[in-house]
Image (spheres, helix red, strand yellow):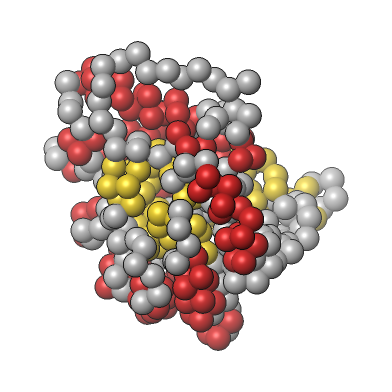
Amino acid sequence: MKKDLAVSAPSLDLSVNLGGLMMKNPVAVASGTFGYGFEYQDYVDPASIGAVIVKGTTLEKRIGNPPPRICETPAGMLNAIGLENPGVEAFVSFHLPRLRQGGVTVVANIAGNTVEDYEQAAAIIGRQPGVAAIELNISCPNVKQGGLQFGTDPAMVEAVVRAVKAQTALPVIPKLSPNVTDIVAIARAAERGGADALSMINTLLGMAVDVKTRRPVLGNVFGGLSGPAIKPVALRMIYQVYREVALPILGGGGIVNTSDALEFIMVGARAVSVGTGLFVNPALPLEISEGIKQYLLEQGLNSIDELVGAAHRI
C-alpha cells in the first residue's frame, strides 16, 4: 500500500536545475538501488521522485558476478552485482517506454570497458525520447589500459566524459569514485571534459569474511560499501570539490533521513540521491523531499539555493 505523503504545508517550489537536468524536487534514487523504477511502484510512484537513475546499462548484456553478491555490514552493506543488465537495446525497447509512459524523470546510467563502449551506449540512449540525462559509471576497468579504472585517472575521466559529450546533447553527469587519492583532481578532469554536473560519491571498495568458512563472503571477494558508514567520507569529498569546481553536485552516500540530506546540501550538493536506505524504507525519497520543504519553511527560506554550500559560509 502506497504511503500518503500529501503536502499540507504552504506551496514552496522545490524544483532543481542540476546542470540541465530538471528535477521536480531535489531527491533522486541512486542507480542500482531502485531497479527500473516500477519494482517499487506498490510503495511509491516513480514519477513523484526528483529523478530515477535507473540500473546501470552496458552496451551488451551482462550476467554479472558469481553469488553471493550482497551482504550486510555494520552501518551499511556490500554489493558486488557486477553490472548485471540486459544491455542497452533491451533498455530502450522495453524499460524506457514504460518509464516514459509513466512520466518518470529518467536518468540513464551507462558503463563500459572502453571509451568506445561509452560512446556507443551514449549515442543510442542519447537519441531516445524520455531520457533526461546520462550518468556515467566510471568505476569500471578500462581493458585497453590494463584494467585500470576510468574513475581513478584524471586523463581517462576527461577522455570518457569528452567522448560521451560528443555523442549527445543530454546533460552528462559522471559519478565519481571515492577510491582515489585526490578527488578534486578527478572532479577538475570531469569539468575539463565538459561534464554538466557531478554525481558524488560511488561506493567505497571493501570486503567481508565469513569466520565460520574462513572465506570471503562475496563471490567476487571485493564489493562496494554503501550506507551510513560512508556518509562522513562523502560529505568530506563534496565539501572539497564544491570549493574548487563550479559544477553542480548530486550528493549521496549513506543518506537515510532529512537531516542527512540537509548536511549534503550544506556542504555543496544541489540535489541528493538515496540508495541503501531504500532497502529499509521505499518511501524515503518522498519523505526526505517533504522534510526539506518543512525545514525551509521553518527557517524562513525561499529555496534550496539559500542552503547550498551553507557550511562554507562560516
In the displayed structure image, the side of residue 204 where residue 215 appears, left or right: right
List the single residue furthest toward the right.
213
The image shows residue 298 at horizontal and vertical percentages of: 23, 17
Quarter assignment of residue 257: top left
Q: Residue at x 81, y 53 (%)?
A: 214
List the single residue furthest toward the top.
8
From the viewer's perspective, is residue 303 above or below residue 202?
above
The image shows residue 269 at horizontal and vertical percentages of: 30, 45
From the viewer's perspective, is residue 62 above or below residue 228?
below
In the displayed structure image, the side of residue 25 where residue 152 appears, left or right: right
The image shows residue 40 at horizontal and vertical percentages of: 61, 35
The image shows residue 129 at horizontal and vertical percentages of: 45, 58
Quarter assignment of residue 27: top left
Q: Residue at x 57, y 76 (%)?
A: 113
Q: Nearer the viewer, residue 268 or 222?
A: 268
Q: Residue at x 44, y 66 (%)?
A: 126
The quarter of the image holding the N terminus is: top right
- Mark yes or no: residue 239 visible: no
Quarter assignment of residue 169: bottom left
Numbered disc total:
0
